[in-house]
Image: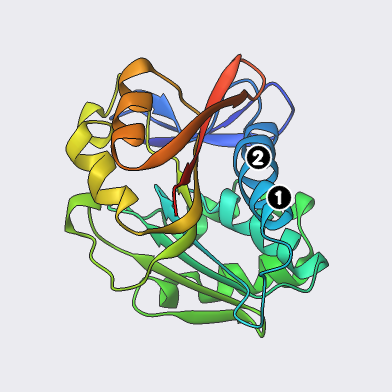
Amino acid sequence: MLAIVKTADGSNTIYNAEIGENYHSKHGALQESRHVFVNSGLGYFLEKESSKIDLEGVSILEVGFGTGLNFLLSADFCAEKNIRLNYTGIEAYPLSPEMISQTGYDQYLSPTTWDNFIEKYPDSLKAGIDITPNCKLQIAHCKLSDFQSEQQYDLIYFDAFAAAYQPEMWDEKAIAHTIQFLKPGGVFVTYAITGNLKRAVKALGCKVEKAPGAPGKREMLRATKIL
């Protein structure tokens, strides 16, 4: 059973009763997404690689597409900077367009991004779709362990449910399967930070750092794959 719930910053999230967890932080869905993924992930990468962003733009892989909020904010961020975005989400249990429409995220986005996403979301579960001329979205309707791709990505957003609810998403095998899709010099970000996670990511050839966390969390993990 799914239900819309309001978070501390006034934005909504979805509560999944079967898992017993929200899709976003109760301290602020919008704040968390902007801080962890858009600012500490995408913004950080673009600043670090500003001289290397070419006509191909930036590519992002998200583990746990969920409501699409991380994608939507990233799409608007790139549109404002005229950067092409190639975005792949992994989602084993996609939400319905009707459920996503109830989140109210349209108020935080450009009408073009929101309207095109809602219209084309069902098709993006089948193949890569141009949401706008400079933004392509494909959602892999599968479990993380079943995801395969020859593509490597500039950024990985790791936004699975917390380890207390989905421990299999955070074990060494799952993290190793994820990091293989990250380009050398690419950036991996997630809202969580634990000793086990830091050790696992470091062992996979990444430079790990603690970054300031979103409201409700003191720290988050950001890692760069060593060249």
Residue 154, above or below 130? above
| Front one among 121 and 149 | 149
> Is the Cβ of the residue at disc 1 closer than 8 Å to that at disc 2?
yes
Q: Is residue 55 left or right of residue 97?
A: right
Crowd tier of the residue under label 2, counting other residues whose Cα lies within 10 Å: few below 14, some 14–19, many 20 or above: many
Image-quadrant location for residue 200: top left
| Front one among 188 and 114 | 188
Q: Residue furthest right?
A: 80
Percent across and percent down for residue 26 are 58, 22
Percent across and percent down for residue 6 are 63, 28
Q: Which residue is mark 2?
A: 40
Disc sitting over residue 123 in the figure: none
Residue 32, above or below 145? above
- Amino acid type at image mark 2: Ser
Q: What secondary structure is marked by label 1?
A: helix
Residue 167, above or below 175? above
Q: Residue at x 30, y 20 (%)?
A: 196
- How far apart are the alpha carbons under marks 1 and 2? 6 Å
- What colouring does the structure picture have? rainbow
Q: Which residue is mark 1?
A: 43
Q: Is residue 179 left or right of residue 49?
A: left
Residue 37, above or below 155? above
